[in-house]
Image (cartoon, coloured by chain):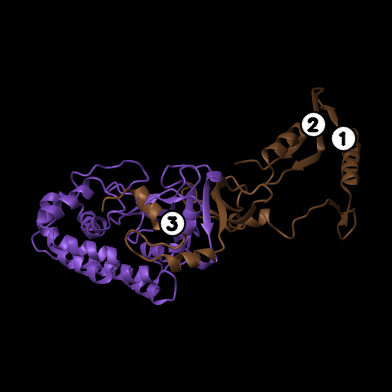
Chain colours: A purple, B brown
Amino acid sequence: MIDWWDNQIQRADLLSARANSSRELLTFYAHLLRAQKAIYQYLRSRKGWLPSGDLESDFPVVGNALPAFLKVVEARGPESLASEARDLSERDDDAIAERLMTYWFSASDIQFFEKAFLQPYLRWLVETGTTPLGREFARGEHYCPYCGGNPQVSVLQNKETTAESGNRDLICATCLSTWEFRRVVCANCGEERPAKLGYFHTPEFDHVRIEACDTCMRYIKGVDLTRLGLAAPIVDEIDAAPLDLWAREHGYSKIELNLIGV
Amino acid sequence: MEVSRRTFIKTTLIGGAGVTVFGFNLAPVYAQTQGLKIARTTETRSTCPYCSVSCGVIIHTLGDKAKNATPQVVHVEGDPDHPINRGTLCPKGASLEQDILNDRRLLKPQVRRPGSDHWDDISWDDATNEIARWVKKTRDETFIEKDKGGYTVNRLESIGWTGGCTDTNELNFLAVKTMRSLGLCYFETQARV
């Protein structure tokens, strides 16, 4: 699974090197992915230790990775995140643990540090088959079956060798795992009427689209891997930030903000 | 960071070129947004009409729902969620878009006369009258009221009807009623889905 992190980092480096409007966002995200990969590697490489799924009891191990993570955000992030990173690095472990536990019980996409820091931990839980304990699971097909998180991005990819059309998966914003989801359904409210579901395309982002619902006025971005197989959905989703602003101007709000805040 | 999600999103864009609460400058992103040409499509699940396998399809229709704009089909693909075909389509089904959009589609009646090597245009009125005349003449000459045993059968064996796979339910309904009332026996609507 190290490869997965490397693929995301390479894609972020590639896209940020291109002259586009999202360069600042992607440059930071590439550094953030490296910091997340380091957390993941640290957790994975600990001999004789497997996560229990209870963040409170795992915190003594998980928390050790926080200082290095905060340094990256402090050095590479915008001023508001950097100052918050400085502030957090001066707090004691109990205060940090309390913040993380608050997020653990009630995740929110506007809590940057908690979400970004715990993503590698939750991904490691998924891979070890460990159930997250103590979390209030949101149930429903549009929530992650593993951790109950919201979808971050929708992905279309071929699963039948002879099919040209893409099966739809959703990637969890909290644990980065993937689950299958139906094609012509709102990923937020379950709306199925075609007239209520709008798909917005632009030639500038040929493989990325807005999948919006006129019933709940929420949207998620979809990355079509049948059009561009080299894309890394959570990275390309950030690269297509102009689509987010367009959607917001037209009255839609995102199901889950990404780690850049769009 | 004590801020509600609603407040967060509202403060993301101020005056069109703002920064996120995380502090990222969105001015260049916003500038690119202004130049985007966005098209809205709709995806409608349907069933391929061509054969009795009944494969699921997704029809992509371009249109912004404006009242003076006609939605246009731009793509048809197999429905990956359909249990029968799981996103696959045969070559004929894969060309379904051309059933809807096709420059070679015939938009007027034509007739090929006995012995002729080409098709001639004919008006709708002439076509309807000529078909009616031939049907009546054939029926009058060949209608079988009783069979050899003297049983009443009221059948017409000299005319056959063949429907098309893309005929609608409504057309097939009317065809059945009309042809049965004439006494037709050799009858095929190709309605199997």
| Same chain shared by disc 1 and disc 3 | no
Question: Along the polypeptide, which appears first: circle 2 or circle 1?
Answer: 1
Horizontal side, residue A129 vs residue A258: left or right: left
Residue located beneath label 3 in the image = A221
Asked whether residue A205 appears in the rendered view, the answer is no
Q: Amino acid at mark 3?
A: Lys
* Cβ atoms at labels 2 and 1 below 8 Å apart: yes
Q: Amino acid at mark 1?
A: Arg
> Residue shown at 73%/60% (left/top)?
B103
Dividing the image into 4 quarters, which one contains the C terminus of chain A?
A: bottom left
Question: B131 or A20, which lies in front?
Answer: A20
Q: Position of residue B136 (x, y in %)?
A: 89, 36
How many neighbours does mark 1 have within 10 angstroms: few (below 14), some (14-19), or many (20 or more)?
some
* Cβ atoms at labels 2 and 3 below 8 Å apart: no
Where, by quadrant of the figure, is residue A112 drawn? Answer: bottom left
> Residue shown at 26%/50% (left/top)?
B2
Residue located beneath label 1 in the image = B139
Q: Amino acid at mark 2?
A: Gly
Residue located beneath label 2 in the image = B183
> Residue shown at 87%/38% (left/top)?
B135
Q: Marks 2/3: CA distance? A: 58 Å
Horizontal side, residue B37 vs residue A142: left or right: right
